[in-house]
Amino acid sequence: MINKQSLWFVTLFSLILVLSIYYVTMSDNSLQKIISEEQETTLVSNEVTENSQLVALRVKEDEEVLKEMENYQSILLDNTKTSEEKNNAYNSLMTLNSKKGKEQEMEEKIKKEYLLDSFVKIKDDTISIVISSNEHNSNLANNIIRTIQDMCPKKMYITVKFQG
């Protein structure tokens, strides 16, 4: 009987073998065409559309979330942990995923309603929003706070910061 590991190995090996044969039998002209098309697409896709400060904040937050998720997953996979510890880790993991989804939803709402790039971070009962805009408008900040508060089931402390 074939186990899953052997089946995956055979499948991936056969895929690599087929792609290798295809690559070897390709003519030089078609290979040059593929390489030139790839270079053209990479030149076009290097444009930056978002503020680099927002990207830096997003990357930092993603790294922190990834570390937390790895910690919870290691608890879930550890055989020495009790079922209560595993349940707590599972619940924390689900809360983390839910929070991340809510942050993305809020960013999309700001983008849709106010046409502004933003970064949203939720921590406990605090929501921090960083807006990429040169205009520092208190009326706009108040409108964003109201919009975000309407999305929350309970009262939250919301701050809006403009960077541009």
Image (cartoon, helix red, strand yellow):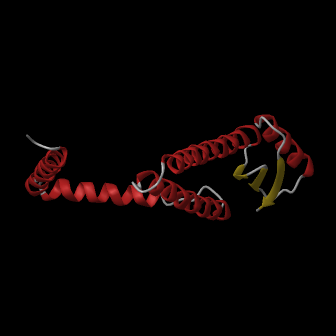
Q: Which residue is drawn at 39% across and 54% down?
A: 79
- Residue 128: name its quadrant: bottom right
Q: In this view, does 161 lie to the left or right of 72?
A: right
User: Where residue 101 appears, x then y in whole percent?
Assistant: 61, 42
How many marks on residues? 0
Q: Residue at x 66, y 40 (%)?
A: 105
- Tell me the quarter of the image containing the N terminus: top left
Q: Nearer the viewer, residue 38 or 87?
A: 87
User: Where residue 119 appears, x then y in whole percent?
Assistant: 69, 53
Q: Which residue is drawn at 73% across and 43% down?
A: 110
Q: Residue at x 60, y 55 (%)?
A: 49
User: Where residue 130 appears, x then y in whole percent?
Assistant: 75, 56
User: Where residue 152 appears, x then y in whole percent?
Assistant: 77, 37
Q: In this view, does 69 lie to the left or right of 107?
A: left
Q: Is residue 73 left or right of residue 157?
A: left
Q: Nearer the viewer, residue 85 or 36?
A: 85
Quick one: which residue is furthest to the right in this view? Answer: 139
- Tell me the quarter of the image containing the C terminus: bottom right
Is 154 above or below relative to 20?
A: above
